[in-house]
Amino acid sequence: GAVVSQHPSRVICKSGTSVKIECRSLDFQATTMFWYRQFPKKSLMLMATSNEGSKATYEQGVEKDKFLINHASLTLSTLTVTSAHPEDSSFYICSARESGHYGNQPQHFGDGTRLSIL
Amino acid sequence: SQKIEQNSEALNIQEGKTATLTCNYTNYSPAYLQWYRQDPGRGPVFLLLIRENEKEKRKERLKVTFDTTLKQSLFHITASQPADSATYLCALDIGGNTPLVFGKGTRLSVIA
């Protein structure tokens, strides 16, 4: 079945550091990927839609200069948390759907990245 | 306003019983509705998808119903096991390449 790989699974770093998270679709192409943030015992909060070859679409209230998204190829999207601060600590999850198959298709999720800023 | 609600934040049931989780929505017209399972510290995993013109879908011990008149989906796990303990998320597919709209989830605990 379709697999989405997300790396790293856990990051602990000092305040002010920039952190890059990678999301790869392993056996399918994805022109669109989605980035979510999840707080403990809360639902998934969509942050942005990553579009291959064009700018990401950010949800209201999400700072695009803070959360840089690059979708460089049909199988890779990256999220960079710039100058991270303790309030950016969270669980970040990426998701993808196979290109050209919309509706009647699940979103495949990575296993998430636990980001802890000290 | 548009809303998707899973009416129980947490549900505890005895092993062997049937767990029933509810998902209600307002001001959406989804073409499909999906259910996912999420374990702590992991990403959601797809379980079942049901179309708007389907009343019921089954997969092993899982059953999903979809009532577009009531704007409700029910998710059943029969003969529940402790290994079924997880958070279950419903999600609306409103079409095109838009992301799914997720409910807040129901945390199911199956007690041996």
Image (cartoon, coloured by chain):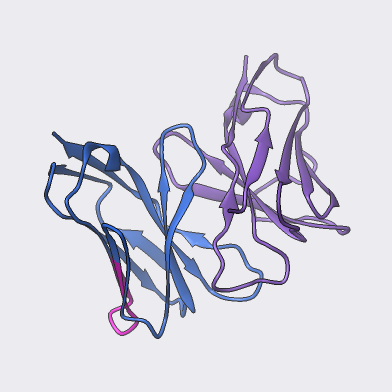
Can you say which quadrant of the picture contains the N terminus of chain B? bottom left
Q: What stretch is highlighted in magenta?
A: B64-74
Q: Report the predominant secondary structure element of the magenta stretch.
A: strand
Q: Where is residue B28 in the image (x, y as percent from the top left)?
A: 45, 76
Q: Position of residue A78 (x, y in %)?
A: 77, 41
Can you say which quadrant of the picture contains the C terminus of chain B? top left
Q: Is residue A59 left or right of residue B5?
A: right
* Vertical comparison of A84 with A34: above or below: above
Q: Which chain is blue?
A: B
Tell me the colour chain A is drawn in: purple
Which residue: 42% across, 81% down?
A: B52
Q: In this view, does B87 lie to the left or right of A70?
A: left
**Magenta stretch containing residue B72, yes or no?**
yes
Which residue: 73% across, 59% down?
A: A32
Q: Using the rendered view, name the quadrant where residue A93 is placed.
A: top right
* Count of marks overlaid on the render: 0
Which residue: 64% across, 46% down?
A: A4
Query: Can I make out residue B1 in this image?
Result: no
Which sits in the foreground, A82 or B18?
B18
Query: Can I make out residue A77 in this image?
Result: yes
Which sits in the foreground, B88 or A42?
B88
Which residue: 78% across, 31% down?
A: A82
Q: Where is residue A15 in the image (x, y as percent from the top left)?
A: 70, 17
* Vertical comparison of B112 with B20: above or below: above
**Magenta stretch containing residue A23, yes or no?**
no
